[in-house]
Amino acid sequence: MDIKFSGKPQNGMALVSVYLDDDLGENMPLQSAQVDLWVPFDDSLEKLHANARSELSNFLKRALNALETPSF
């Protein structure tokens, strides 16, 4: 997982891009995803990374819930 910050903070929030890569092995292709999130800004890089991981976790939980919920 790689976390990159984009631009300047706005209204106390920072835009981050989280890159997820899954190397499935020699005979399988690399699978990857990018998720862009707004996270609470903090001067501490450690806190920004923690905020990004927390927001990503919440986002993925909501996405999985949406996938598991019948839409018809």
Image: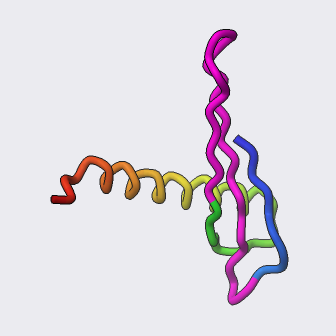
Of the pair 38 and 72, the residue shown nearer to us: 72
Question: Quick check: 38 above or below 23?
Answer: below
Give the percent coordinates (x, y) of residue 20. 65, 41
Q: Name the chief secondary structure element in magenta.
A: strand
For the image shown, how many numbered marks are present on the structure?
0
Q: Where is residue 32 shown, x and y percent of the image?
A: 64, 39
Task: Please tell me which residue is depicted at 83% across the width and 79% down the height of the picture.
Answer: 8
In the image, what residue occupies the spot 62% across and 45% down?
33
Residue 63 lies in quadrant: bottom left
On the picture, is 20 further left or further right than 8? left
Residues rendered magenta in the picture: 10-35
Question: What is the x, y in percent for residue 40?
Answer: 64, 74
Q: Is residue 36 above or below residue 42?
A: above
Residue 36 position (above or below residue 57): below
Spot occupied by residue 7 in the image (x, y as percentages of width and height):
84, 75
Quick check: is 43 in the magenta stretch? no
